Amino acid sequence: MRLDVTLAAGAGVLVAATLYAQPATGPWAKVPAFPTACYVSQENEKFHTKLDAALEAVQADHSQQNDINAKIRDSAKNVDPMELARRLQENMMKDPQGAMKYMQGIQDLGQGYQAQQQVTFDKEAQLEAEEKALIQRYRTALEKSYAPGNARWDALKKKLGIAPDSRGPGESGVPDWAWKEWEVILREWDRAYQATCAQWWNVAGPMHAHMKRYKDYLVQERIPHYQKHFDEPTLKNYQMMNVSSKGYKSVAEFAAVEDYIKRAGRIFSERMDRPRCTAQRCEF
């Protein structure tokens, strides 16, 4: 998670129309729709190809916005200290009530930040653990569905007298009956995978549901948290210093979308590339 945190020393009530804007062309719009196919080969354009392209595009926009924010930060740092003090004093005298709210915001931020940060960290850790547990449950369910095919394969290995860790009957000297049995086993594994896939990868299944929960957390909790505790104070500081913040935007959304894309890549990579068999033949 990478954020351009700048001058976050106070909290204000600044309302910036463009700060939290999420236009249709924003980073979320770059995320491709998640697949429901059991096999990667069933997609006209592979999901991971589109996902990699989306991540690259979001990272490029993120980097560009970081550069813009950095230039604004540098312009604030380059203000002469005496001139900075004069500007701050002038703004405080011009709007004493606003200055009091600004100072109170600094105090409130310090008091509430750590507690809210811990809540965010805990939720992030919970969702990371949920992702790992979800993948493990899927693998366990898949292995359970393979049990009948595995039993036939164990029996075939014993009949052929080959090693328990063999990945197939062999390359030569295998009798025809063994190849026929091996094809039965491969088709059994395909049926098992497809039956399991139908439960896990459909749009109402556990994988899509987890990604929805993760996005809800990012949009409703993590992004607002960083905008409140980093972007709002930063913009208020610029305002108090009479430093132009034109072009500044929060990068919290970029960082969140990047994490979202990476998680989707991990989860959807659990699908098989293609079936072991076609209607005509199996790949031995």
Image (spheres, helix red, strand yellow):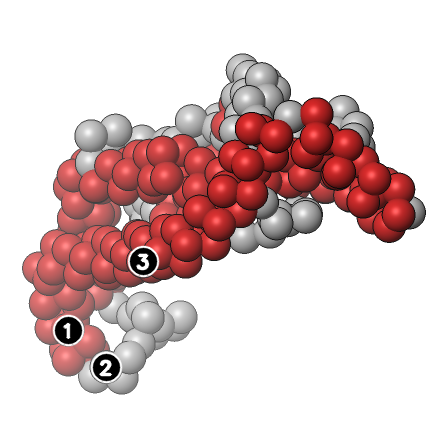
Q: What element carries label 3?
A: helix
Mark 1 to mark 2 CA distance (whole Å)? 7 Å
Q: Do the residues labelled 1 and 2 touch (CB within 8 Å)?
A: yes
Q: Mark 1 points at which residue?
A: 154
Q: What element carries label 1?
A: helix
Residue 13 horizontal/vertical position (percent) = 52, 29
What amino acid does circle 3 point to?
A: Asp
Q: Name the residue under label 2.
A: 164
Mark 3 to mark 1 CA distance (whole Å)? 45 Å
What amino acid does circle 2 point to?
A: Pro
Q: In this view of the protein, which residue sits in the foreground, 32 or 89? A: 89
**Badge 3: how crowded within 10 Å, few (<14), some, or many (20+)?**
few
**Which of the numbered marks, if any, corresponds to residue 117?**
none
**Badge 2: how crowded within 10 Å, few (<14), some, or many (20+)?**
few
Residue 204 horizontal/vertical position (percent) = 20, 30
Residue 7 visible in the displayed image: yes
Q: Quadrant of residue 140?
A: bottom left
Asked if 245 appears above or below 189 in the picture, the reply is above
Asked if 157 appears above or below 264 in the picture, the reply is below
What amino acid does circle 1 point to?
A: Asp
Residue 31 horizontal/vertical position (percent) = 50, 30
N-terminal of the pair, mark 2 or mark 3, is: 3
Q: In this view of the protein, which residue sits in the foreground, 172 or 147? A: 147
**Which of the numbered marks, if any, corresponds to residue 122?**
3
N-terminal of the pair, mark 1 or mark 2, is: 1
Residue drawn at x 47%, y 54% is 110
Give the quarter of the figure containing the C terminus: bottom left
Residue 11 horizontal/vertical position (percent) = 54, 40
